[in-house]
Image: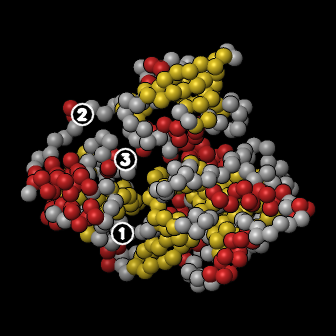
Amino acid sequence: MHDLRSRDTHCRPLGTLSFALFLGCFVWGIAPARAVHSERITPIVRAVREASPAVVNIQGQKSVSDSREGAGGASRQVNGMGTGVVIDPRGYILTNHHVVDGVRRINVTLAAGQTYVAKVVARDKETDLAIIFISTPKALPVVRLGTSQDLMPGETVIAVGNAFGYEHTVTTGIISALHRNVQVNETQQYLDLIQTDASINPGNSGGPLLNIDGEMIGVNVAVRAGAQGIGFAISIDKALEVATQMLSIETLDNHWHGMTALSVDGPSGPVTVARVQRSSPAKNSGLQRGDLLERIGSVSIRRPIDVERALLGRRTGEGVPVVVRRNHEQIELNLTLARRPGRDRSRTPQPANPLQRDTWNALGMILEVAPRSALRGQEIPYESGLQVVAVRPESSADKQGVRKGDILVRMHRWKTASESDLRFIVDRADTLARAGDVKFYIVRGKETFFGHIDVADLAVSSRTRR
């Protein structure tokens, strides 16, 4: 929950509920233990039963500086909570940016009780949306998506979320108004929000606002501090538009399909190919402007985001079957993914020494000591770092979104202020590899970001050098 006084990330952790109480709530909310009269199973009960398995609870901890003096300021740990919604069965979850921003370890708990550590895949601070990912042994249930185009003031809505740490809290109300603009602070403004009187509390942020049919029609985001019955949600149409960009295979996989897909009759209508780029994989496959996309691989195409979902995580050169409808005829094509154009390897700087070669091969970065002026005046606990000179396409760094010009300030628990710091890390590659993905922090402009790099290749490089 992100209220207008920023109380979301400063909430104190609640005590653990007893197992008996938790089990009782879970059984009552999702799996009734005995038969009940059919009249008690109202549309609201059915909507909650259908949507709840796709709703996850998010817990995390972040450091907050108590001083504006940069490196000299003390920091304290605060606990935050929020909610997310599964939008892809492989483990991609939509939530709010402020729920995961700066969180050191994002813990995600499923409706069935399993807990996983999540990675941030992409984020958009302006719209306060983010996508995180968890790796699970089984496919996850996905929320059923609706549209916000036909919403009506007065219609019943349902909010589900981790309110004040009470997992899967359900509240109901109505849509109070549409198209609200809300100024949270000097830097954060929300546009075109849904206003509702369904109770939205700290911890509800990132959770679904549902209609009476159990379809997600909004992402809960804010509450008006000091005012009862006034909460807000980002419309699902806007949220999915941003999520489509965040899941772009060009951004995440450095792949290219070369088509622009649009919903022709609103967000829930058929998806048409609006544009095909010259010499692109889409063009080479035979796709044409005006084709209605029905299926890519095993994914039915109902929205533009399904195009990215269907192609995400595939290999360069992999052929993907595509089914389209053209002039009322069903046609089967084959789309072969290619690398994103515009990366000229011949112009990529070459490693100048063995250390740069190690980090280039294993991490996908060439690093140089950043000028001290680069971090001067920043409200961060770092005075120096290593500047990214180049990023290798399809490397760990590239897939995490690292760019040329970023300043690497920390890996794992060690600062990266000099080449000797980096050598220290490289020499401990085997230890890091056993720990799995390693967290790193970069400074870009006036913001600090973090990601996770797979250091298995670094360990191999280290052993080979010995």
In the rendering, which numbered label is found on residue 45? none
Measured Cα–Cα span from mark 3 to mark 2:
17 Å
Q: Indicate the secondary structure of the residue bearing disc 3.
A: helix
Q: Name the residue under label 2.
A: 345
Residue type, numbered disc 2: Arg
What label sits on residue 380 in the rendered view? 1
Q: Name the residue under label 3.
A: 399
- Say whether residue 370 is left or right of residue 465: right
Q: In front: 321, or 124?
A: 321
Give the residue displayed 64% in from the left and 46% down from the top.
238
Residue at image position (74%, 60%) is 48
User: Looking at the image, which residue is at 26% across and 69% down?
Assistant: 414
What's the CA distance linking mark 1 and mark 2?
A: 34 Å
Question: How packed is label 2: few (under 14 Cα within 10 Å), some, or many (20 or more)?
Answer: few
Type of the residue with mark 1: Ile
Q: Are marks 1 and 2 in contact (CB under 8 Å)?
A: no
| Residue 293 visible from this viewpoint | yes
Q: Residue 50 placed where, x, y %?
A: 72, 56
How far, Cα to Cα, is label 3 from label 1? 25 Å
